[in-house]
Amino acid sequence: MKKILTISSTFLLMVGLLTSTAANAQQKASPAKVSKASVSGNDVSINYSSPSKKGREIYGGLVPYGQVWRTGANEATTIELSKDANIGGVAVKAGKYSLFTIPGEKEWTIIINSNAKQWGAYSYDKSMDVGRFTATPKALDSAVESFTIEANDQGVVALIWDKTRVEFNIK
């Protein structure tokens, strides 16, 4: 009887450990996030993965200046519009697009690309750009740990991470 209890207890402990390990393995290091807004009746949805700073140098380090960045982690960030819009001065038809950036110390290039199904920026193709525009980064007083995209109903979209905030407008 004692042997059966010992075997049963050991089995239950192992099942518990395996379940716990599997649950932790399924959590992404850069979790999926969504930012939504309604800009003058235009439903805007931005899907991205949110990496964390983890003590690293972000811009000019992990995210090099002057190179196309997926604007987050994992799959390319996407922006979806229910109606035609003007994004940073670029006319964009209703639909789903990828959102890339080229960070710079004094200026960022924001890119709207027609290929919404990409992993990272590895297959980024400039010929599929709908348009590009520039935005000016602003320094923050304190570091933000996780990359965040905020969109509000006034049409302001903010890319926020580390000590940097970059904004652009949707009209």
Image (cartoon, rainbow, N blue to C red):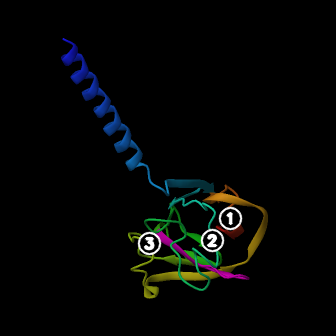
Q: In what element is the residue under mark 3?
A: loop
In the foreground, 43 or 148: 148
Image height check: is 61 above or below 12?
A: below
Marked residue nearer the N-terminal end (3 or 2): 2
The quadrant the C terminus occupies is bottom right
Give percent across and percent down for residue 143. Answer: 72, 61
Residue under numbered circle 1: 162
Give percent across and percent down for residue 168. Answer: 68, 70
In the image, what residue type sits under mark 3? Gly
Q: Which residue of the protein is positioned furthest toward the top in this rendering?
A: 1
In the foreground, 164 or 13: 13
Image height check: is 23 above or below 131?
A: above
In the foreground, 18 or 69: 18
Asked whether residue 40 is in view, the answer is no
**Does the stretch in magenta take in 126?**
no
> Which of labels 3 and 2 is toward the front?
2
Q: Counting other residues with Cα less than 10 Å from the Cα at mark 3, is it few (<14), some (14-19), or many (20 or more)?
A: some
Task: Specify the label residue 120 is tagged with.
Answer: 3
The quadrant the N terminus occupies is top left
Q: Which residues are magenta?
A: 97-110
In the image, what residue type sits under mark 1? Asp
Q: In what element is the residue under mark 2?
A: loop
Residue under numbered circle 2: 58
